[in-house]
Image: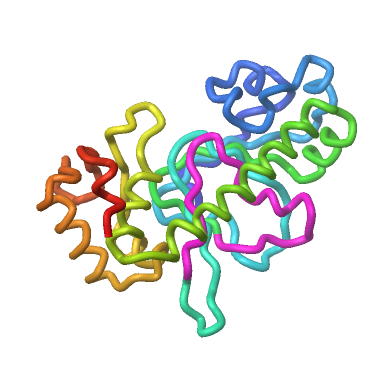
Amino acid sequence: MIPIKTESAWRGTADCKVCGVRQLVLFADLNEHDFGLIHAPIDELDYAAGASLFTEGSAAKGVFTLRQGTVKLVRSTLDGRPRIVRVLRAGDVVGLEALASQQYDSDAITLTPASVCRIPQDVVLKLSSSSPRLHAQLMKKWQHALKEADDWLADMNFGTARRRVGNLVLKMRSAENREISMLFSREDMGAMLDLKLETVSREISRLVREGAMEQLDKQGRIYRVLQPDSLLLD
């Protein structure tokens, strides 16, 4: 899908310097001199839910800092099934592998409407070599990405169906309000947890029925977590 809005929102330094989520994303520690090294435009893009940022195996041209929304990283298994390997949220960097290879290693697809900043690869590479602050930030983001990938593998692929669903509910809690968890379609959840759609639906209904969480919307995407420990009981 094509972004619903594409606009070259930054040409120079002004918008990045006053960005409301700057402390969350890649340029958090840059100073005036660092910004002076940037000459290529950084595009601010809005995507509708279900849009593609890039595809697995495509040429890597840059990285994306996620300002708002959620993005799923999807890889194909040997038998051709799509498997969601991680979910990214505001403050995460999408396509970080672009700095170490010439291609992206997964599909990046928006789960919700999303706002991103697309940073050309040569901008990040130049800054990482000339700015110790950005290099340190890149290493921090990279280490975070590796830890998140390990955590997803450990928490989402082992244990009973109930435990897997419970782990996902806990991981998707809002940073602003830890009682609120934002979920996705049952099909997407199944692809994350390696469970059938029917199994995911059954386990969510069971957790609601037992009082571990309560549904807050008609679509079954927003829940209030009432008993966090109960979500992990087998």
Per the image, is 104 magenta? yes
Per the image, is 149 magenta? no
Q: Is 221 placed left or right of 151 in the picture?
A: left
Residue at 72 percent across and 32 percent down: it is: 137
Q: Position of residue 179 (x, y in %)?
A: 28, 33
Q: Position of residue 10 (x, y in %)?
A: 66, 28
> Who is closer to the viewer here, 135 or 48?
135
Residue at 24 percent across and 69 percent down: it is: 199
Of the 4 image quadrants, the one containing the C terminus is: bottom left
Q: Name the residue furthest bottom.
A: 79
> Who is closer to the viewer here, 191 or 205?
205
Q: Is residue 120 visible?
A: yes
Residue at 61 percent across and 29 percent down: it is: 9
Total labels drawn = 0
Residue at 75 percent across and 22 percent down: it is: 30
Tell me which segment is drawn in magenta. Answer: 83-107
Q: Quadrant of residue 127?
A: top right
Q: Is 97 placed left or right of 229 in the picture?
A: right
